[in-house]
Image (tube, rainbow, N blue to C red):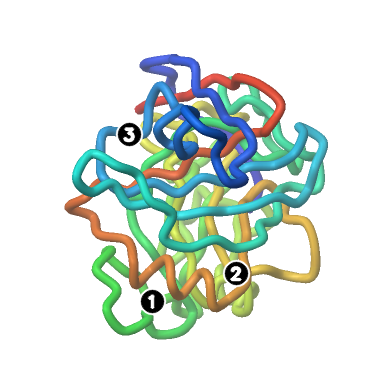
Amino acid sequence: MRTGVPALLTVALLLVQAAPAPAAGRGPLPARMTDTGGGSQLITAVAPSPDATTGTLTWWDRRGGRWTATGTAPARFGAGGLVEGSVRRQDTRTTPTGLYGLPFAFGSTAPPPGTRTPYRPVRPTSWWCQDNAAAAYNRWVDPLPPDCRAEEAERLLDYGAQYAHALVVDFNYHRPVRGRGAGIFLHVNGEGATAGCVSVPAPAMAALLRWAEPARRPHLAIGTESGATAVIRY
């Protein structure tokens, strides 16, 4: 749940505006974006402003060339607000804006029936390494390797409620940049704002795992209502 990002390969502009009922001619939010990841499923997490800690998460399906909202839920963001992913720094408690893949899911409980995303069960020995000096920086490790200090790692079972179900967000994941942050997930709500992740109520998280189909290349777009933000593609 702490923070960092992989090397920037492609930068585009993603128009992230408010997602109420669309005005005539505007179309749904995904149709107004310059990049949705190339698949036919998309999750949008939209905050009203960069300093907000709450907003709205919506999941969308594209069929017959049209995007349709399938579900929506209140979302929580980092206690430090939102910041462009390419300039984010570790331990700032900010949520990185951008467009991200969802490599795999994990959880301290069994996956919801119908889950198709690869799913890893959290065990007492499961950690997420956030140690900048470790070879496994920003990686699931089981058990904790000797070069990853426990005080710079997250024992996943310690967050059993939040990580009852979660999706890994590929921010700084494929080619990690040290110091940009690690452990950014879409997970179940805790008591308040997150340390940089996006969180939703437990029923919404379960619904997302039943909905997501890897073959349809779902992505998560994080942004604000008030303007354009950089999209980072890996």
Decide: few, some or many residues near mark 3? Use Cα within 10 Å; few <14, some 14-19, many ≥20: some
The tag earlier along the polypeptide, 2 or 3, is 3
Badge 3 marks a residue whose secondary structure is loop
* Contact, mark 1 vs mark 3 (Cβ under 8 Å): no
Residue 132 in sight: no
Question: What residue is shown at x 78% (from left), y 56% (from top)?
Answer: 193
Residue 12, x across and y down, in percent: 44, 15
Residue 188, x across and y down, in percent: 60, 69
Of marks 1 and 3, the one in the foreground: 3
Q: Mark 1 to mark 3: distance in Å? A: 27 Å
Question: What residue is shown at x 50% (from left), y 69% (from top)?
Answer: 205
Q: Quadrant of the C terminus?
A: top left
Of marks 2 and 1, the one in the foreground: 2
Quadrant of residue 202 within the rendered picture: bottom right
Out of 143 and 96, give the one closest to the viewer. 96
Q: Amino acid at mark 2?
A: Val
* Contact, mark 2 vs mark 3 (Cβ under 8 Å): no
Question: What residue is shown at x 58% (from left), y 46% (from top)?
Answer: 21
User: Which residue bears the numbered disc 1?
Assistant: 121
Of marks 2 and 3, the one in the foreground: 3
Residue 161 in sight: yes
In this rendering, position of residue 122 left or right of residue 15: left
Q: How many marks?
A: 3
In this rendering, position of residue 231 left or right of residue 38: right
Q: Mark 2 to mark 1: distance in Å? A: 15 Å
Q: Mark 2 to mark 3: distance in Å? A: 24 Å
User: Which residue bears the numbered disc 3?
Assistant: 37
Badge 1 marks a residue whose secondary structure is strand
- Compared to residue 90, the image places residue 116 above or below, namely below
In this rendering, position of residue 216 left or right of residue 196: left
- Compared to residue 113, the image places residue 6 above or below, namely above
User: Which residue bears the numbered disc 2?
Assistant: 188
